[in-house]
Amino acid sequence: MIQIKNLWKSFEGKEVLKGLDLHIPRGETLVIMGRSGCGKSLLLKLVTGLMQPDAGEILVDGEEISGLKFKELNQMRRKIGLLFQSAALFDSMTVEENVGFMLAQHTKLSRAEIREIVIEKLHLVDLDGTEHLRPAELSGGMRKRVGLARAIAFDPEVILYDEPTTGLDPVTCVEINRLIQSLHAKLEVTSVVVTHDMDSAFTVATRMAMIHSGKIVAFGHPNEMLENDDPILQQFILLGAPEQILNVSNPVLKEFILNLRED
Amino acid sequence: MADQPSVPQQKTVSLLRFADFAGGRILYRLSGFGRASIFVFRTLALLFKPPFQLNLLVRQLRLIGVDSLSVVLVSGIFTGMVLATQGYIQLSDLSAEGQIGRFVCVSLIKELGPMVTGFVLAGRIGASITAELGTMKVTEQIDALSVMGTDPVKYLVVPRFLACAYMLPILTVFSTFSGIAGGYVVAVYVFSMNGVFFMKQVQSYLYISSICISLIKATSFGMAIALVGCYKGFTISVAGGAEGVGKATTGSAVVSLMLILVLDVLLNHLLFTLLQLK
């Protein structure tokens, strides 16, 4: 679905991505892990065309996005839904206007038809009856869910999640994780989740990748990642979890961490 | 001991450092000018590109025009009053106080009407546009528009640009006539002048060409205020946060005010000197 080849990106002389290669197969939920500033969120911005790479290729559904004209890029973006870290809801609009924004902009659907779709998408994220509220009236978790409803409103083929559980309480984190899993199952989409929340990562992932020094240093199934003896990956998984160990809901991860700690 | 560089070598190094610094600053300014030019041309190109979202334009017309009317009327009245007071004092030295109606009318129509309206709108609307778009940029709302396949310039800048270009001339008409009314009050009720004579003077110096000059200036000021406000909001660094929004808002008001003054000089030269309009 998404193929990234030899991707380079630097800011003011500082190289962040250094020849990154990644293949995201259709229908998978890929979790991308890595330290803060390693380029995880940047990767999502490059995939959505919000930024241009210095070198390399990004193919979405076989189309190279840096070669697309503005209009073609906007067409391609309609295949992708992005949940921003801050949700990035339009604060001058209601929940209904936020979720129905793409439909109002890019289709000739009537207001009643858009409203019907909005209600359906809000139901998928367990936010029935919130259409009339404004973003300022929502909690952090609700904002994320509205952001998610907006991301899926146009029935995208790919959903990108930028740190979906950051800043949320453990209960809401679990709810968001369940939501990611259920949307993946119901909508049969390709999902890319950027996170350093290990519990979330091991709960939702069907594939995992770790970015370090501007490259993918580990890629595979969650169990393969646990068996991978790369010291950077092991350190990341171990250090990423101790504070949350009592809250870890994934039994495989919990056992793995306990074993590592005993070692 | 390591070899110390000789005095000529030190001078060369200092000179190179200075050239590097100066060159860097010049390139930075030039690239900023280039980015601003691209932004302006892009906005102008998108004016004629469908879809035309009238609802967005109507909302901005209300925010920029209707909501600014009271402040424009008040500032116009007081400008006219001050103008009449100062005009009477100066003209009476020349025994020409009877010309106060002409003085107030011509000054307001050709100069102060569009200028004061421009200043009020630069402070009220230009700064508000920058703060709004800057906050949207910092909170990734502008990125969200792009990701959803909507051109942010078309969606956010074009309606504000058109609304400012349409509403500034209309507000200027209100400002000018409220200024004349203010001048009338001072001339008639403070300096005991004949009201009919005052109004006849206003009428006889109210040329169509003067009104056109006023509207041309107002439209130009409106375009400048919108473009500066939007550009400053769009180019805020996300890392700048709330402080960045504050700085950009102040910068937007200052640049708009300066630009209005520069445009006024250029338009005066073009309209009065080159085209010799009255």
Image (cartoon, coloured by chain):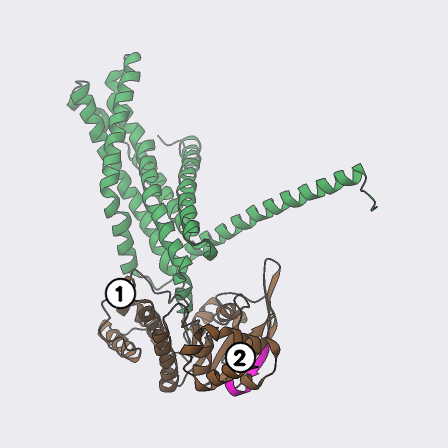
Q: Which residue is mark 2?
A: A261
Residue A215's x, y, as percent? 60, 73
SS type, badge 2 = helix
Up-down: is B143 above or below A127? above
Quarter of the image holding residue B22?
top right
Crowd tier of the residue under label 2, counting other residues whose Cα lies within 10 Å: few below 14, some 14–19, many 20 or above: few
Disc 1 residue type? Answer: Thr
Q: How would you rate the neighbour count of disc 1 (Cα within 10 Å): few for under 14, some for 14-19, many for 20 or more?
A: some
Which chain is represented by brown in the image? A
Along the viewing direction, whichever of B30 and B142 lies nearer the viewer: B142
Q: Residue A142: percent from the left, percent from the top?
A: 31, 70
Q: Is residue A221 magenta?
A: yes
Given the image, on which type of amino acid does mark 2 rest? Arg
Q: Is residue A201 magenta?
A: no
**In green, which chain?**
B
Q: In this figure, which residue is indicated by the disc labeled 1? A: A94
Left or right, B200 with reference to A92: left
Q: Earlier in the sequence, mark 1 or mark 2?
A: 1
Q: Quadrant of the C terminus of chain B?
A: top left
Magenta-colored span: A216-224
Estimate the x, y position of residue B52 in percent, counting from the top left. 33, 61
- On screen, A76 above or below B202? below
Residue A222, percent across and down?
51, 85
Q: Is residue A21 visible?
A: no
* Of the pair B257 and A169, the residue shown nearer to us: A169
Residue A50 seen by the camera: yes
Q: Is residue A119 left or right of residue A156?
A: left
User: Residue B121 appears in which quarter of the rendering?
Assistant: top left
Q: Secondary structure at mark 1?
A: loop
Q: CA distance from mark 1 to mark 2?
A: 48 Å
What mark, if any, has residue B185 been given in the picture? none
From the viewer's side, name the closer residue of B39 and B131: B131
